[in-house]
């Protein structure tokens, strides 16, 4: 009963969707390595509720804004409390994705996917910057917030700010009934299970998989994605878990290579297209775990500064999958090599040319460009993990960092 009014309080029981086994190491030396190896399952769990395997079709389920019914679709006012139906999504004219850290890099991958599939502008913003600017939220804008914990202070503050300005908010998070989940209008869940390691791994790949589903769905609703392309993209997404399983074989490679890699004075990660945010994420992981100097760059920006860093003591991690930008990326790789950089190339399949011009070549399974990011990030996670472990650092609890940033 309430202590002030004496009225009976009705509390709804809440089921927690994990069990004690999920927060044990299960034979792995660290939680992080366990979570890296859980990524095939995490990606499958993220997309499973939203994909019909029989039809190769995406239908977002459980988003559920609630709100009033729509009388006239031509007069939708996003400031009103409309349900997030397919009809309302079809009227979205722009998307704003707000996040921090690793989630922000997932948002940048989402920008490429949504703009390509739905042909609408997408802006990504760092929550700690967004909340203190004089932002303009235009009509018919859908705001997406990404937070593994659902408690990230800056992202929560940004969510409240856009809600005050009448925006509709869709949250992507891993923890049901977290603050961001409760305050958003609509909800998509990672279903990745508890992530104990401070450096996010499986939550990152689950986020990218879920954004893939969203991008396909809104592309179909906007009429910019044909049925033929939808089938192709869905098939690529369904293949991703087994392909990630194959990439996990690099675990042994980086375990052995850690001593050699530790001798470099710096690491430059580069990529183009969806590989650019993965380069940023790879550099972040190395900084978080191994406390080494690492930078991520768009490969096309090399001539605008990063070339000056390159010499024989600089490792160049070049993401060069077989996609529409492969030839451009290869040209950037040659530029770095000509200046003495030691190349670790990550490409597609048995690419003899990449193997020949690189110090180390890591072949990924052949995949569609929309899912390359899911495969590319795994060797970068393993590299950061093994290098940090070799240097004797606590990979599950890096210094000065917390799993959930709940204060500024």
Image (cartoon, grey):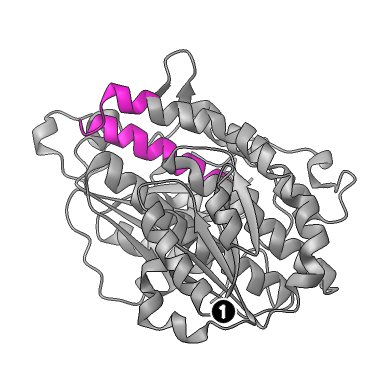
Q: Along the line of sight, which residue is nearer the eye, 129 or 346?
A: 346
Q: Is residue 16 visible?
A: no
Position in image of residue 298 (x %, y %): 41, 67
- Predominant SS along the magenta part: helix
User: Judging from the image, what secondary structure is the residue with disc 1 in?
Assistant: loop
Q: Residue at x 78, y 71 (%)?
A: 260
Q: Quadrant of the N terminus?
A: top right
Above or below: residue 4 compared with residue 363: below
Q: Along the line of sight, which residue is nearer the eye, 313 or 281?
A: 313
Q: Quadrant of residue 301?
A: bottom left
Query: How many numbered marks, from 0 up?
Result: 1
138 left or right, relative to 333 = left
Q: Which residues are magenta?
A: 206-231
Q: Residue furthest right?
A: 27
322 left or right, relative to 45 = left
Please give the residue where the numbered disc 1 appears in the rendered image.
340
Q: Along the line of sight, which residue is nearer the eye, 288 or 268?
A: 268
Position in image of residue 360 (x %, y %): 66, 60
Is residue 354 rendered magenta in the image?
Answer: no
> What crowding class fits label 1: few (fewer than 14 Cα within 10 Å), some (14-19), or many (20 or more)?
some
Q: Residue at x 57, y 43 (%)?
A: 7
């Amino acid at each position: 009963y309430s202590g002030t009014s004496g009225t009976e309080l009705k509390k709804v029981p809440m089921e927690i969707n994990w069990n004690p086994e999920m927060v044990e190491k299960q034979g792995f030396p660290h939680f992080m390595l366990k979570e890296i190896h859980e990524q095939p399952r995490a990606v499958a769990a993220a997309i499973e509720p939203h994909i019909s395997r029989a039809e190769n079709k995406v239908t977002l389920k459980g988003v559920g804004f609630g709100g009033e019914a729509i009388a006239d679709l031509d007069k939708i006012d996003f400031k009103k409390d409309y349900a997030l139906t397919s009809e309302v999504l079809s009227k979205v004219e722009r998307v704003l994705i707000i996040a921090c850290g690793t989630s922000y890099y997932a948002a940048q991958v989402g920008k490429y996917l949504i703009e390509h599939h739905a042909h609408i502008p997408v802006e990504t913003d760092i929550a700690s910057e967004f909340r203190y600017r004089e932002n303009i939220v235009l009509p018919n804008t859908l705001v997406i917030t990404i937070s593994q914990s659902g408690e990230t202070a800056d992202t929560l503050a940004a969510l409240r700010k856009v809600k005050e300005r009448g925006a509709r908010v869709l949250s992507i998070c891993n923890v049901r009934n977290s603050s961001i989940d409760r305050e958003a209008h609509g909800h998509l869940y990672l279903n990745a299970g508890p992530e104990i390691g401070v450096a996010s791994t499986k939550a990152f790949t689950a986020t990218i998989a879920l954004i893939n589903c969203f991008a396909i769905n809104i592309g179909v609703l906007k009429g910019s994605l044909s049925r033929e392309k939808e089938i192709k993209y869905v098939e690529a997404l369904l293949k991703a878990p087994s392909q990630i399983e194959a990439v996990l074989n690099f675990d042994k490679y980086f375990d052995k290579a850690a001593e050699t890699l530790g001798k470099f004075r710096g690491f430059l990660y580069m990529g183009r297209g969806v590989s650019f945010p993965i380069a940023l994420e790879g550099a972040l992981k190395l900084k978080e775990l191994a406390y080494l100097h690492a930078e991520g760059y768009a490969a096309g920006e090399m001539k605008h500064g990063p070339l000056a860093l390159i010499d024989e003591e600089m490792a160049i991690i070049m993401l060069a999958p077989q996609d529409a930008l492969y030839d451009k990326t290869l040209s950037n790789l040659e530029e770095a090599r000509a200046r003495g950089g030691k190349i670790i190339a990550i490409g597609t399949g048995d690419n003899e040319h990449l193997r020949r011009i690189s110090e180390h070549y890591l072949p990924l399974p052949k995949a569609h460009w929309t899912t390359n990011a899911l495969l590319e990030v795994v060797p970068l996670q393993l590299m950061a993990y093994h290098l940090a472990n070799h240097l004797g650092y606590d990979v599950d609890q890096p210094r000065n960092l917390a799993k959930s940033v709940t204060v500024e």
